[in-house]
Image (tube, rainbow, N blue to C red):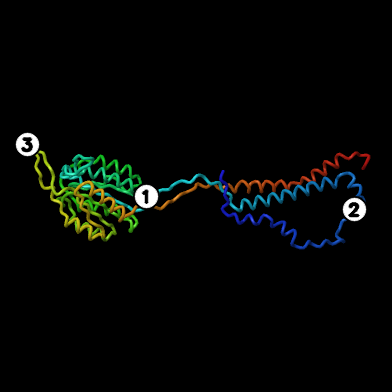
């Protein structure tokens, strides 16, 4: 049991009654007010004085113990439990991932094999999410429509799982970048202003949606949301055809718009042509928007001052009982009639 006093300085009051007895002058006793008892020696011989002295000693000891218990209770004794790590919320980070039809192009390499763009994003984004300790993370998937797949949460593992389950074309084959930004701003609006961050990954240009990407960027800037845009995909891709392997253009990535979005909101634009450069982008994001490293620990505390306080009350009640008078009655009843 780890016993701790919240206010240990109050224990200095323990010797206060003794100091009062030693330092303060005694009260003067008027001899004229004394009661003269001619048969004082007979009372002493019968043991009645001793019986009355014992309760006086008992009351004195009870008072001392009660005072000590009251001082201990005033110092607030506590029992401390084991320390518990409390998650600290750092940034509110929304991840918007393009799952339009073009994200199925195989021009990214993971483990010496070509994979689709969305597969590379899933692998590296999941690793990025694991490092965001203390951040609240949300997930938006967008194609022709933008959908909130996971609201802001400290459960980064669930967000990574939902990202891994995303399928290309689920939200349509076109790309609504402006709608994705607008949805992210709506979800980040209630978060602390300095911590609102959106990371948007896309491999194309805005071809759908009701909101123009640059107008959505203006709205994000007004709401204090920093947008980091990442252009995913190579400049060309290899495609197996009946006529052999052909190299085709990598896509219609609108880098100017992505740069404009980042510039308007105080973010940055990154180009990820392969998995190595995408991994480097995530490392740069970790440096620009570092995860919270604050350590917040909480120790459960049980207040136990009620125990010494209860015992002090019990001793006070016992000391107030007429034990001395009861003993004197018993002693008087035990005297033989012949001695009266």
Q: Residues within 10 Å of mark 2 (few under 14, many from 20)?
A: few
Q: Residues within 10 Å of mark 1 (few under 14, many from 20)?
A: many
User: Given contact means CB atoms under 8 Å apart, are the residues at marks 3 and 1 in contact?
Assistant: no
Gap in angstroms between the C-alphas marked 3 and 1? 51 Å
User: For the C terminus, which image quadrant?
Assistant: top right
Task: Pick the residue in front: 334 or 13.
Answer: 13
Residue at position x 27%, y 47% in the image:
139
Instruction: Say whether residue 148 is visible.
Output: yes
Task: Pick the residue in front: 23 or 338.
Answer: 23
Which is nearer the N-term, disc 2 or disc 3? 2
Residue at position x 59%, y 49% in the image:
305
Residue matched to label 3 = 242
Nearer the observer, disc 3 or disc 1? Answer: 3
Residue matched to label 2 = 37
Gap in angstroms between the C-alphas marked 2 and 3? 133 Å
User: For the N terminus, which image quadrant?
Assistant: top right
Residue 221, image x and y in percent?
Answer: 26, 60
Q: For residue 288, which quarter of the picture?
A: bottom left
Q: Is residue 22 left or right of residue 293?
A: right
């Amino acid at each position: 049991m780890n016993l701790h006093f919240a206010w240990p300085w109050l224990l200095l009051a323990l010797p206060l009654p003794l100091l009062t007895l030693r330092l303060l002058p005694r009260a003067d006793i008027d001899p004229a007010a004394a009661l003269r008892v001619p048969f004082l020696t007979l009372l002493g011989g019968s043991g009645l004085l001793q019986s009355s002295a014992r309760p006086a000693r008992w009351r004195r000891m009870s008072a001392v113990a009660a005072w000590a218990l009251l001082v201990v209770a005033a110092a607030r004794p506590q029992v401390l439990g084991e320390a518990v790590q409390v998650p600290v919320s750092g940034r509110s980070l929304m991840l918007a991932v393009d799952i339009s039809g073009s994200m199925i192009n195989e021009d990214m390499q993971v483990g010496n094999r070509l994979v689709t763009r969305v597969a590379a994003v899933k692998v590296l984004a999941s690793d990025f999410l694991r490092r965001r300790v203390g951040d609240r993370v949300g997930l938006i998937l967008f194609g022709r429509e933008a959908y909130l797949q996971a609201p802001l949460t400290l459960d980064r593992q669930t967000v990574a799982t939902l990202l891994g389950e995303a399928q290309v074309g689920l939200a349509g084959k076109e790309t609504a970048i402006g709608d994705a930004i607008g949805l992210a701003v709506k979800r980040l609006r209630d978060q602390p202003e300095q911590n609102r961050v959106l990371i948007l990954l896309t491999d194309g240009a805005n071809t759908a949606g009701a909101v123009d990407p640059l107008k959505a960027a203006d709205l994000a800037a007004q709401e204090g949301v920093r947008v980091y845009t990442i252009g995913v995909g190579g400049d060309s891709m290899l495609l197996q055809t009946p006529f052999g392997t052909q190299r085709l253009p990598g896509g219609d990535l609108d880098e100017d718009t992505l740069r404009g979005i980042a510039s308007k909101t105080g973010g940055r634009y990154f180009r990820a042509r392969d998995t190595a450069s995408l991994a480097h982008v995530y490392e740069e994001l970790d440096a620009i928007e570092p995860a919270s490293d604050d350590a917040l620990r909480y120790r459960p505390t049980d207040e136990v001052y009620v125990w010494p306080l209860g015992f002090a009350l019990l001793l006070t009640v016992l000391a107030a009982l007429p034990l001395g008078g009861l003993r004197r009655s018993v002693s008087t009843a035990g005297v033989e009639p012949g001695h009266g």
